[in-house]
Image (cartoon, helix red, strand yellow):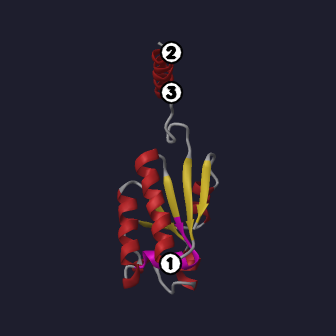
Amino acid sequence: MAIFRLLKVVALLVLLGAAFSVTAAEDGRKLFINLTSDDGPRAAMAIGFGTRVLEEKKMPVTIFLNVEGVRLANKNIAQCKASQEMLRSFIKHGGRVIICPMCLQNVGGMDKDDLISGVTMGGPEVTWPVLFEDNVTVLSY
């Protein structure tokens, strides 16, 4: 008899939780991933995490490539092909990739023609509005 009462309470809590749950996107939360490295495992973790958040949490995710991380978006670097495929998948799932233009030149020795498609050139007018919005969580890799 007590077990049935417990099951009823658990069922009621589950139903109430479902009725009052709000997705991350509905409450305005966003994720900003700062990726400073072109190290394969580190990049895979950052990009994979961002893609999974897009798929499961249904919230906006931006990956900011800077310092050595800019090399990941260079279509001419064969060692970064796996990361480039992950970035393409991330973009396909609705993610946004912004790249630091100063790092692009200073660290990568690249220009915008070297980038995989879908990567946005950053700058204060592009990066800051995404980074400094309300309800933004920042992860750094």
**Residue 39 — which label?**
1
Residue in the image at 49% along x and 15% along y: 5
Query: Disc 2 versus disc 3: distance between alpha carbons?
Result: 23 Å
Q: Give whichever of discs 3 and 1 has the lower sequence position.
A: 3
Q: At which x and y percent is residue 76?
A: 37, 84
Answer with the quarter of the image where residue 117 lies: bottom left
Residue, disc 2: 2
Give neighbour class at mark 1: few <14, some 14-19, many 20+ (Cα, 10 Å). Answer: some
Kindly state the secondary structure of the residue where label 2 is placed.
helix
Query: Are the residues at dot 3 and dot 1 in contact (C-beta closer than 8 Å)?
Result: no
Give neighbour class at mark 3: few <14, some 14-19, many 20+ (Cα, 10 Å). Answer: few
Observer-nearest of 115 and 65:
65
Q: At which x and y percent is residue 96?
A: 46, 59
Observer-nearest of 40 and 74:
40
3 vs 1, front mark: 3
Query: Disc 2 versus disc 1: distance between alpha carbons?
Result: 56 Å
Residue in the image at 46% along x and 17% along y: 8
Q: Give whichever of discs 2 and 3 has the lower sequence position.
A: 2
**Residue 69 lies in the magenta-colored region:** yes
Answer left or right for 130 relative to 91.
right
Residues in magenta, as a range: 64-74
